[in-house]
Image (cartoon, grey):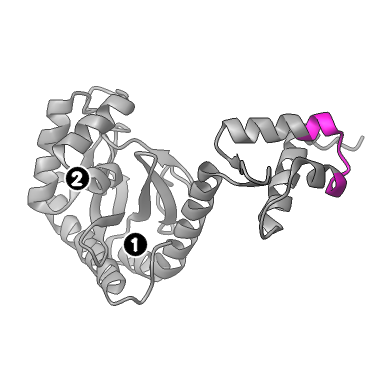
Amino acid sequence: MTAQKTPMVPALERGLKILETLAKSKNGYTFSQLVCLLDYPKSSIHSLLVTFERLGYLHRLDTSGRYVAGLNLMRIATAASHGNMLRQKAGSMLCELTRRTGLTSHLAILEDNEALLVAKVEPLGTQPVATWIGKRIDYHCTSLGKALIGWLSEEEIDKLVKQHRMLRHNENTICTPAQLKRELMRTRQTGYAVDNEEEEVGMRCIGAPVLDSKGEVAAAVSVAGTVERIRLEDVPRLGALVQETAYELGRRLGEGQWRLA
């Protein structure tokens, strides 16, 4: 008996088709124009347009009634472009970092006050790390997250904590603003951040910020492995290697060899 494929969601398919149609237009389309272009019921198109507009994915121009891309849609597109460019330009450097350390290397950007993983390189023959491209990582208990927010002002940190609570993963997790600020101070002093079994017991990670031509944090690089592979006495040496990779990425940013979206 042939297994049936998982059915598609009609409403989602229609919504994506609307977004694709608007993305291809130069000046957007009105509701009437979309009805003519798409073979969908008027009520369905109207409901989807209202939903996208309320959620900020589309914007309706008052003067013409045309629908165009909203801020949320542009934010997603920018993040995707940003991530793709970073992956392309940083891939060889992450491979080299993994070769030199024997550990899994990561690259992340800050998106909606979370570390968004955009690249990953794993060494052969080692225990896989439970991460994947597109994974969102907490800012307070990961080396990538700490490296990304480590140079924010105290006011920005306070705002971040108010907007996103610090989830406790285990007994090692930093879960108070005072603890976080002390940890970020150590990060600034050493130039790299450490996740010492804070997100997952038995795992350690070391991350460093990538600075752009303006001296601002544009991304973060890290290595991750088990506590057996990253011993506490290894942290300074590995931290220096991660910093070296992050510095080289930042240098390329400064020289204009590649740009962030």
Q: Nearer the viewer, residue 240 or 44?
A: 44
Q: Nearer the viewer, residue 29 or 85?
A: 29
Q: Residues within 10 Å of mark 1 (few under 14, many from 20)?
A: many
- Across and down, in percent, residue 185 comes to 9, 42
Local SS, label 1:
helix
Q: Residue beneath label 1, please?
A: 98
Amino acid marked by disc 1 = Thr
Q: Quadrant of residue 39?
A: top right
- Across and down, in percent, residue 84 comes to 49, 61
Note whether residue 237 is visible. Answer: yes
Local SS, label 2:
loop
Q: Bounds of the magenta span?
A: 36-45
Quadrant where the N terminus sits is: top right
Q: Residue beneath label 2, please?
A: 150
Q: Quadrant of residue 47?
A: top right
Q: Quadrant of residue 57?
A: top right
